[in-house]
Image (cartoon, helix red, strand yellow):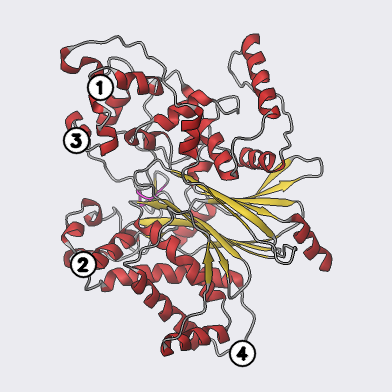
């Protein structure tokens, strides 16, 4: 029998629960399904999704083995996933036939789910000429957690040049990823401002005049900002630009983008920590800043200015460049490094930052202190503060924090904090005409798809050109009739127009619905999207994607000028 544990960033012990507790804890939408159990409808809907002979649902991806699926599932989940002699077949003493009956979402229902969070933005042309190297971008999210812990942001810098785009992967809740998605771009924009502009903004605040707009946000209606914390966030940002004014006398006019990105990341993380230590008289804000600090988030941010592309990455989200070769094929260029146990340089960095007697305990079972998968992240003060500071903040904090077992839990072998940093690794790339697009995505995508497949799928979608490759069947025994069906399906796909109007949506469709032959299987896609909240997280992670399309003509013009 196959039991697929859910990927967890933080590997603290999970209390197993009995079936009644498991049922009582279910959210309202799932509780509505429970009357159907007595009529055997649940097994009709979800029964086939748990059968192990559908290997591609949970076991077939070679990349999943390298992911975060390393926790033993609680007994309650293992029982719930057992396909035969299921508990719903014995409800109220009655026994039902265990033969699964197929139930699938219709294509419109699948599209409705996939397109619920999609967003597109096209860079406007000025005087009939597009002077930006960015044509536009598509973004989308598919939740697995409830609520989703991923966030995304995109904005145009108004006082300087360029665009900012980023994905943020939260863990231990969504509080930190939400805060970082709201605040980080302001810190970056302020770091890029010249001394004169900073002075002008500060004088406007002092005199009560309207401020110069710094960013133009491009947001989906679901991408909200916290109104309650806006004043607190603004005061912290103002303190930062005041310090920049004091440090910079105005003699130097050159702005180092790499240095600005690093300073912005580190300063925001420092402010998150400081706000939690100081607290707030407002009980709601006090609890909010503590939730932000004790949860965590990784970040992958791109700054595009003409042909200058900088990627700042903290954690295990990724940036991938799509390059079109002369023969029309696609190749992937990685512009970020994962900060986890698979990165030898990160392992070496961690060991050098702590005493030699901690060499065997600082990373255990591929996790920081045996608990945390990413080795760099915002928040996560449990891996940064001293034990005394953690105890003082928790004891003086609200009851909700003091009663939380996770916040009171001290990591093992915790001797020489901080063990975690938010400092990003910045990669620079000068754009070329063959660089067609950039994919920013949280690890929910990379756990299910190889980078080359990601770039090929997006490239073929954007150009409408498909390079036919021999159908690979791996070790599967395929009959002549099955092969004929695969070829017919591929021919139909080539001749039909795309049903997706968004490149990120198209990529999610493949990430969730691809079968072992590399084509979208509607049956598989329907099953994966039909899973209730309690099971979805056991099969995949939240997926957030931004696809940035570059203007090759503008990039080529820059190149010719040089």
Magenta run includes residue 370: yes
Q: Report which quarter residue 400 is drawn in.
A: bottom left
Against 227, is 434 above or below? above
**Which is nearer the N-term, disc 3 or disc 1?**
3
Q: Which mark is residue 283?
A: 2
Q: Which quadrant of the figure contains the C terminus?
A: bottom right
User: Which residue does the numbered mark 3 point to in the structure image?
Assistant: 24
**Most distant residue in the front direction:** 127
Against 440, is 129 above or below? below
Of residues 379 and 24, the one nearer the viewer is: 24
For the point 51% across and 87% down, the residue is 199
How many residues crowd mark 3 within 10 Å: few (<14), some (14–19), many (20+)? few
Magenta run includes residue 460: no
Label 3 to label 1: alpha-carbon separation: 15 Å
Q: Which quadrant of the figure contains the N terminus?
A: top left
Q: Secondary structure at mark 1?
A: helix
On the image, the x and y values in percent for residue 265 come to 48, 67
Label 1 to label 4: alpha-carbon separation: 73 Å
Chain part drawn in magenta: 367-372
Against 110, is 131 above or below? below
Q: Which mark is residue 551?
A: none
Q: Secondary structure at mark 4?
A: loop
Label 2 to label 3: alpha-carbon separation: 29 Å
């Amino acid at each position: 029998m196959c039991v697929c544990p859910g990927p967890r960033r933080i590997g603290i012990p999970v209390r197993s629960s009995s079936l009644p507790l498991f049922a009582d804890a279910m959210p309202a939408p799932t509780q509505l399904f429970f009357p159907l159990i007595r009529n055997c409808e649940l097994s009709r809907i979800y029964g086939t999704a748990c059968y192990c002979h559908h290997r591609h649902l949970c076991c077939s991806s070679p990349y999943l083995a390298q992911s975060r699926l390393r926790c033993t599932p609680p007994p309650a989940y293992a029982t719930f996933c057992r396909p035969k002699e299921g508990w719903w077949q014995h409800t109220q003493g009655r026994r039902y036939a265990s033969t699964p009956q197929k139930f699938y979402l219709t294509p419109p229902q699948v599209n409705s789910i996939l397109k619920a969070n999609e967003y597109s933005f096209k860079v406007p042309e000025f005087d009939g000429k597009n002077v930006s190297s960015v044509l536009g971008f598509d973004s989308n999210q598919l939740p697995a957690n409830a609520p989703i812990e991923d966030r995304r942001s995109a904005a145009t810098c108004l006082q300087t040049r360029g665009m900012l785009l980023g994905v943020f992967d939260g863990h231990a809740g969504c509080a930190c990823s939400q805060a970082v998605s709201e605040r980080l771009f302001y810190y970056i924009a302020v770091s890029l401002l010249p001394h004169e502009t900073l002075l002008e903004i500060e004088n406007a605040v002092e005199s009560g005049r309207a401020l110069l707009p710094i960013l133009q946000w491009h947001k989906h209606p679901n991408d909200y900002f916290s109104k309650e914390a806006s004043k607190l966030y603004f005061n912290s940002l103002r303190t930062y630009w005041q310090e920049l004014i004091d440090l910079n006398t105005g003699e130097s006019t050159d702005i180092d983008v790499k240095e600005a990105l690093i300073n912005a990341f580190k300063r925001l993380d420092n402010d998150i920590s400081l706000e939690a230590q100081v607290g707030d008289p407002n009980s709601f804000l006090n609890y909010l800043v503590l939730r932000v600090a004790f949860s965590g988030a990784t970040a992958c941010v791109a700054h595009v200015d003409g042909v200058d592309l900088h990627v700042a990455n903290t954690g295990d989200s990724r940036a991938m460049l799509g390059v079109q070769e002369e023969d029309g094929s696609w190749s992937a260029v990685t512009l970020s490094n994962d900060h986890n146990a698979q990165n030898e340089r990160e392992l070496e960095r961690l060991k050098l930052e702590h005493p030699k007697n901690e060499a065997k305990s600082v990373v255990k079972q591929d996790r920081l202190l045996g608990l945390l998968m990413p080795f760099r992240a915002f928040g996560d003060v449990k891996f940064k503060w001293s034990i005394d500071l953690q105890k003082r903040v928790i004891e003086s904090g609200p009851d909700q924090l003091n009663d939380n077992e996770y916040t009171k839990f001290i990591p093992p072998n915790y001797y020489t904090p901080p063990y975690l940093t938010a400092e990003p690794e910045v990669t620079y790339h000068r754009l070329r005409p063959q660089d067609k697009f950039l994919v920013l995505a949280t690890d929910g995508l990379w756990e299910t798809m190889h980078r080359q497949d990601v770039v090929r799928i997006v490239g073929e979608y954007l150009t409408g050109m498909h390079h036919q490759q021999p159908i690979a069947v791996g070790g599967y025994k395929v009959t002549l009739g099955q092969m004929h069906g695969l070829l017919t399906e591929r021919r139909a796909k080539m001749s039909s127009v795309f049903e997706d109007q968004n490149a990120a949506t198209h990529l999610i469709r493949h990430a969730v619905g691809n079968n072992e032959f590399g084509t979208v299987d509607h049956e598989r896609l329907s099953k994966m999207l039909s899973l209730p909240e309690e099971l979805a997280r056991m099969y995949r992670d939240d997926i957030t994607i931004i696809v940035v399309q570059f203007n090759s003509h503008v990039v080529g013009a820059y190149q010719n000028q040089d």
